[in-house]
Image (cartoon, rainbow, N blue to C red):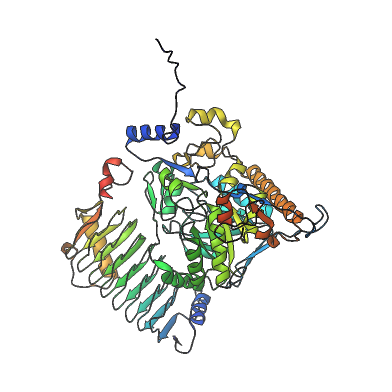
Amino acid sequence: MTYHNPPTTPRFSSTFDAYTLSEIRRAAATGIYDIRGGGAKRKIPHFDDLLFLGASMSRYPLEGYREKCGTNVVLGSRFAKKPVELKIPITIAGMSFGSLSAQAKEALGRGASIAGTSTTTGDGGMTPEERGQSKTLVYQYLPSRYGMNPDDLRKADCIEVVVGQGAKPGGGGMLLGQKISDRVAEMRNLPKGIDQRSACRHPDWTGPDDLEIKIMELREITDWEKPIYVKIGGARPYYDVALAVKAGADVVVVDGMQGGTAATQEVFIEHVGQPTLACIRPAVQALQDLGMHRKVQLVVSGGIRNGADVAKALALGADAVAIGTAALVALGDNDPALEPEYKKLNTTAGAYDDWHEGQDPAGITTQTPELAARLDPVRAGRRLANYLKVMTLEAQTIARAAGHNHVHNLEPEDLCALTIEAAAMARVPLAGTSWIPGQGGV
Amino acid sequence: MRTVDLARTSLRELNAELHRQTEGANETGFVVLNPRGGHAIAVGIDAPVDVQIKGSVGYYCAGMNKKASVTVHGSAGPGVAENMMSGRVVVMGDASQYAGATGRGGLLVIEGNASSRCGISMKGIDIVVRGNIGHMSAFMAQSGNLVVLGDAGDALGDSIYEARLFVRGKVKRLGADCIEKEMRAEHHEALAKLLEAAGIRGVASTEFRRYGSARKLYNFNIDNADAY
């Protein structure tokens, strides 16, 4: 008797998927880990896993185009003599001149100023283009202190002490030699063309007790005028926020693992830190436990894409959000119109993340003059302003539908979750139930 | 000469008064009494004033100094003259960790010893220490000069860039990518000027050895991974 033995369909491993196999081959061929820009790309619980309930019998909505819904936010009201008031609760996150072209930094300043919000410097110092075009500029105080000087500190509207960032909590940075132009080298006091390491921790303080003294020094130098932010990566948000408050922060910025970086190891981006969604409630709880919620403002970043994300972050207790990757996309990053050029770089529009190599065809993450000249700061700034306005309108639309006359009146009770994981992280009920995993209820 | 007693005047009043001084101001001399280890004393000055602090100070004394001459008649806590831009800071006693951290210019003189991480990430400052310095000094030092008349602790100049290190005594161990370099005529000349500027007499540049970067870690190479 003979048996017919039909061939089976080739079966690919879920564990050793195509990307994993390609990474093993790449590592074996090169002997070095993969470095890239951006934030975590893996699928993790996010704002998409939450829904707004909207108004119903117990709550009445506000008229969409008639009734007021405020969006302004005041940051730095705890200690600073000159807190800043922004028209919208969406800020531009810190991104360095060096990782970004001067044109891109100028465009960020222009767009943010049109929209009535702030932009932020990054590792590498403050450029005149950025200061000149930014109505409200936050000056980052970073471990590397590249470009740091008291004159720029005084020119800033706010100071952000960077302890960590979501893409790499506990990690420093590296700007590879090919992006070190004469100007970048001069601003960083280093020779042209060499890799510039950004330290992972500050050179003159360690721990929250030291930070308290460091913040006091910064306040003394700037005569207590400027709001001082502390930015942390999404590592231990409850304790980190509590310690930042104890250290004297006016504002705490919490950056989840979807938050981008200019260049870091892929393994770091994808395997260290917590999702943004998991960071907000512990951060808010820390503020509430200290009686400081709404007194010390909370800014959340990492994967904010639209007005719904903004509204959800605010509903969970944030005072404002910050965007980085989305702002770059608004300027023109990863535009499909540039597909032929992305193909030359062995990638495709939407997936380009080798920002550290300085070959960005959109002229944003580059220091090559011919590429950088492709970005028109005025036009790109307008695009960013448009995008910020759309996000704001979207957040207002949702807030009105939930019956709120200010986006800050959104609250966790306006939300439900689509998954058990999101319900547990956001501490809102699973849709169709009153069950909040880990919080009791049925 | 104006005297400010920190037992009666707040730190805020002192620093605000120092910040009010501008180029050509009438008041150019300040004496600060009873510092009692306070933090952030005389920080952020941007004028050619002279500040004499009669006692020991805490963290970040003379931080981000520009143009001023600040003398601590005692010892200094962590981060003295951090990120100094210009001017002169003198510590008559010892200095704690991170002395002159990230400093961009000016001269820091420590008459006693300096603790660990002296000159960390220095970016153009000149530092002269009459005594010894602790471990990890000049870590990631970018530019400027660190002169040590005594001994240097472990891992001197780890991951150093273009700063120059001159040590008269023993070095416990050099850090990654830091090597001894030849003392050429230009180095003797520069060192002699630094010693003179620091007010150090009777010490010759020939008594020092020079250390700096091997420049092997300037661009990442996987074959150098064991060096980190």
Indicate whether B1 appears above or below A35: below
As drawn, is A341 to the left or to the right of A145? right
Figure quadrant of residue A340: top right
Q: Residue at x 49, y 67 (%)?
A: A244
Residue A197, position as x, y percentages in the image: 38, 51
Q: Is residue B75 above or below residue A131?
A: below
Image position, residue A30 (x, y; %): 33, 34
Examine the rendering and report whether any part of residue B67 can be seen.
Answer: no
Q: Is residue B95 visible?
A: yes
* Residue A240 appears left or right of B188: right
Q: x and y percent of residue A334 in the render?
A: 56, 37
Residue A416 at what x, y percent from top left?
65, 53
Looking at this view, is A382 or A325 the one in front?
A: A325
A189 versus A339 height, above or below: below
Q: Residue furthest top?
A: A1
Q: How many marks?
A: 0
The residue at 49%/87% (across/down) is: B9
Q: Quadrant of the N terminus of chain B?
A: bottom left
Q: Residue furthest bottom?
A: B8
